[in-house]
Amino acid sequence: MVKFEQVTKNYGKQQIVKGFNLTVDKGELVTLIGPSGCGKTTTLKMVNRLLEPTSGRIFVNGRDIMEQDPVQLRRSIGYVIQQIGLFPNMTIMQNITVVCKLLGWTRERCMHRAAELLQLVGMDPEMYLDRYPAELSGGQQQRIGVLRALAADPELILMDEPFGALDPITREQLQSELKRLQQQLQKTIIFVTHDMDEALKLADRIVLMKDGRIIQAAGPDEMLRHPADEFVTSFIGKDRLLRSPDEVLVEEVMLADPVTIESYRGLAEALERMRKRRVDSLMVVDNIGVLTGIITIRTVQSNLTAGGPVSNFLSPPPATVTVGQTVRQAVYLMAEQGAGYLPVVDEKNRLQGLMTRASLVDILTDVLWPDVKENGELTAAAGKEEDR
């Protein structure tokens, strides 16, 4: 659909895009991402000749863009930018069908197309066709910007950080709508963003750029599993990378603030702490934080009238894992013990955190679950904190 062959772009002596080679397949959504100044927007604008390449060739549907009339080329390509650029003196219908009108469509055909597109994004045509941009919210205006790019039914759409100025909730909604529309309409989309979360959510393929060059071009899963180098790793963020359970340490996934009580405290205080923190057991520690055992709500209720310090009613500490052990080791220990949680301690048995099934589900990915399913026992109870 779109092919870049050794494309470069210079501004004076400065080379902004350097030897860019990429093929975007029909129906594919490709995101260009990278730090500011990496050349992603410049690359996008060369496709519809808002900027012209210094050297190299760009093909759209097999035709060299430099051999086409730039005005006709732009009318055949949808284009959406962050600033939206709606015409304030035109109705929503007129804004959506600007390109359609330039292509000679009748008013009736334009109105039908605008109504059809509004319905695609859940906006009632009777309510919105005759409104003006100032009467819409920012999210609604951006929807109209996307619909305008779709109006003449182009095969290719270019999007330059279209949701960057929106609040997080509206942005997420529009990302979901765009992904749905792309899957439904099978448009080819080149999408510039600076947000890795957005790229991971939307892209069939992510093209990560630095200093005008492609550092890695891969699907989201491939990039998360196999970043090409340290730059890719740091740009993605290590917290997003899909790592083997042998590479993830228990301290990375543990709850760092488990509910504890000192062994010299009373049972009434233990009961009140459980009530406030909504738990049914407490980790018991001594005055220097060493784990000495656990106490459950059943034990507290059975002995409340007798009174006395928590230390008189302890159950032995459950199996523990030590800081520096891997998640794989912890998961197998949980399965062996049939435990819903494991305290995490240091080399002196001081409590550092708590590993629960829920914390594993929250943080780990499906990289882990095939191994757990082979063991069987843990998977059935994943996500439950049985003894808490």
Image (cartoon, rainbow, N blue to C red):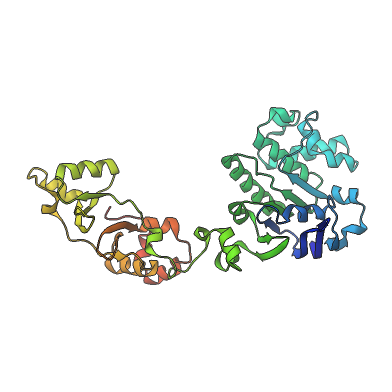
Work out whether 165 lies above or below 245: above
Work out whether 158 lies above or below 64: above
Can residue 267 be seen here? The reply is yes
What number of labels is visible?
0
Residue shown at 30%/59% (left/top)?
341
Q: Is residue 271 left or right of residue 221?
A: left
Residue shown at 23%/51% (left/top)?
282
Pick whichever, 43 or 73, lies toward us: 43
Q: Measured from the top left, where is residue 104 in percent x and y?
A: 91, 41
Residue 81: quadrant of the picture: top right
Q: Is residue 90 left or right of residue 127?
A: right
Q: Locate the N terminus and report the quarter of the image it occupies.
A: bottom right
Pick whichever, 2 or 284, lies toward us: 284
Pick whichever, 85 or 381, lies toward us: 85
Q: Measured from the top left, where is residue 277 in percent x and y?
A: 29, 44
Q: Is residue 66 left or right of residue 30?
A: right
Can residue 150 be seen here? The reply is no
Q: Measured from the top left, where is residue 113 in percent x and y?
A: 79, 40
Q: Measured from the top left, where is residue 13 in percent x and y?
A: 82, 58
Q: Is residue 157 left or right of residue 303?
A: right
Residue pushed farthest front?
Answer: 13
